[in-house]
């Protein structure tokens, strides 16, 4: 947790400036953004390269362990729309992976697994 706090402090203080946010998002109408929502899990595939923006480098360091888009947005104190724009660029360059979270309802029912286990034990 302490590394996350350190990363948060390294974010440029100018990020609260709306003009700066517009510059780092790049895509003014958002038409090219990936389909990400607040619970999409993101994990980095590599270390930051010298060519990525400073905000993207912070995301790559934060996401060494999977984090949701909402967590990334909160840690960086950036709006969701700005974070999704930055993540879209990282996805395009294959520096990160994203996936929907595992929903408990999609996992097999425990009673079914126990029945199969008992059936196998009887063999």
Image: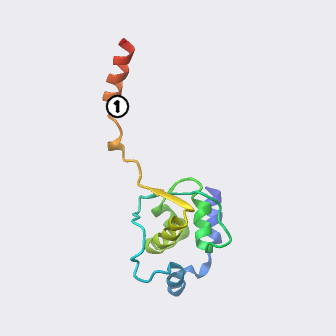
Closest to the observer, 18 or 103: 103
Quarter that holds the C terminus: top left
Looking at the image, which residue sits at the far top?
123
Tell me where residue 53 sits by quadrant: bottom right
> Which image quadrant for residue 110?
top left
Identify the secondary structure beneath mark 1: helix
Residue 43: % across, % down: 54, 56
Q: Position of residue 29 (x, y in %)?
A: 40, 82
Seen in the picture, residue 110 relative to 37 is either above or below; the reply is above
Residue 120 or residue 110, whichever sits in front? 120
Q: Answer left or right for 75 relative to 123.
A: right
Quadrant into which the N terminus falls: bottom right
Count of numbered labels shown in the rendering:
1
Residue occupying the point 32% across, 43% down: 105
x and y percentages locating residue 84 in the rendered image: 46, 70
What residue is drawn where x is 33% and y is 43%? 106
Above or below residue 92? Residue 120 is: above
Residue at the bottom extreme, as displayed: 19
The image position of residue 94, as x and y in percent, is: 54, 62
Colour scheme in use = rainbow
Q: Residue furthest right?
A: 50
Asked if residue 14 is positioned above or below residue 110 in the image, the reply reads: below
**Residue occupied by mark 1:** 110
Q: Nearer the viewer, residue 22 or 32?
A: 32
At label 1, counting other C-alpha atoms closer than 10 Å, the crowd grade (few under 14, some 14-19, many 20 or more) is: few
Q: Which residue extends farthest front? A: 93
């Amino acid at each position: 947790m302490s590394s996350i706090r350190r990363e948060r402090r390294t974010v440029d203080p100018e990020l609260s400036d709306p003009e700066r946010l517009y510059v780092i998002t790049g895509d003014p109408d958002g038409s090219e953004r990936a389909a990400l929502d607040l619970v999409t899990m993101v994990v980095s595939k590599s270390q930051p390269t010298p060519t990525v923006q400073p905000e993207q480098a912070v995301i790559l360091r934060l996401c060494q362990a999977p984090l949701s888009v909402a967590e990334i947005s909160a840690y960086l104190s950036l709006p969701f729309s700005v974070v999704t724009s930055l993540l879209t660029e990282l996805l395009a360059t294959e520096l990160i992976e994203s996936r929907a979270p595992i929903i408990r309802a999609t996992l097999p029912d425990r009673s079914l697994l126990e029945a199969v286990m008992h059936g196998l034990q009887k063999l």
